Image (spheres, helix red, strand yellow):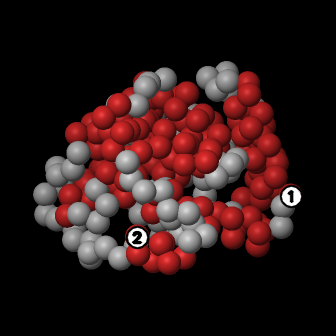
Amino acid sequence: MDRTLKALSLLLSYPSPELQQAMPTISSVLGSDGRIAAKLRRGLRSLADSLAVDDLIEVQERYVSLFDRSRTLSLCLFEHVHGESRDRGGAMVSLLETYRDGGFELSTSELPDHLPVLLEFLSTRSAKEARETLADAAHILQALAERLNRRASPYATVFAALLQIADSRADAGALAELRAVQDVNQDDLEALDAAWEETEVRFGADPNSGCPQVRGMLSRMERPVDRRAVS
């Protein structure tokens, strides 16, 4: 198991009492991975350490404010490439089938394209497969890192670390498209309401629909997931 990817998955998960208790272990794991620059490792440990001791309600409110209230910071990867289009449904079906073919049934209420779920899946893959999969999503990771940096959020270090593990530059055209999307401030409730007024999600029948990056990502997922926590 790639314990760093597992730790990053947990770091991006919704804060809970159990997760707070695990933060010292998560901090230790993230502080020892040489693939990540020393400055980023310090940032990751600082984030984990603060999540361990800060008031849980406040930590949860910050998490929701960032990742649940703003579409541009959504942790659901297909949100950034498909929005609410029909292609998103097809890509979601493909990902579910990939998980199931590998013997992995989702045990959470999160969607299959939720980044923490994907990272947990990748934590059991070879380094090459995990790196290539993260490289496929590098434009999304880069855009999220930039948006979080503008908010001075320590969560930006998680995405910067994932980009270093991917060891790949984001596709310039795909990144430019994401940068062109209006990044709504999560405190602007009126603008947020307008941004969420989209058409109903329709899950299409074609599991191969979707962008090339997503198809490439799915093609490398073949083995089952071990859902045990970092130990």
Secondary structure at numbered mark 1: helix
Mark number displayed over residue 195: 2
Kind of residue at disc 1: Val
Q: Is residue 31 above or below residue 185?
A: above
Q: Residue furthest right?
A: 53
For the residues labelled 2 and 1, the Cα–Cα distance comes to: 34 Å
x and y, in percent, of residue 214 in the image? 29, 44
Along the polypeptide, which appears first: circle 2 or circle 1?
A: 1
Name the residue located 30 percent from the left edge and 35 percent from the top edge: 173
Relative horizontal placement of residue 76, taking residue 15 as reference (left or right):
left
Name the residue located 33 percent from the left edge and 44 percent from the top edge: 177
x and y, in percent, of residue 193 in the image? 45, 77
x and y, in percent, of residue 174 in the image? 32, 39
Secondary structure at numbered mark 2: helix
Residue corresponding to mark 1: 53
Q: Is residue 153 above or below residue 217?
A: below
**Residue placed most toward the observer, 102 or 66:** 66
Image quadrant containing the C terminus: top right
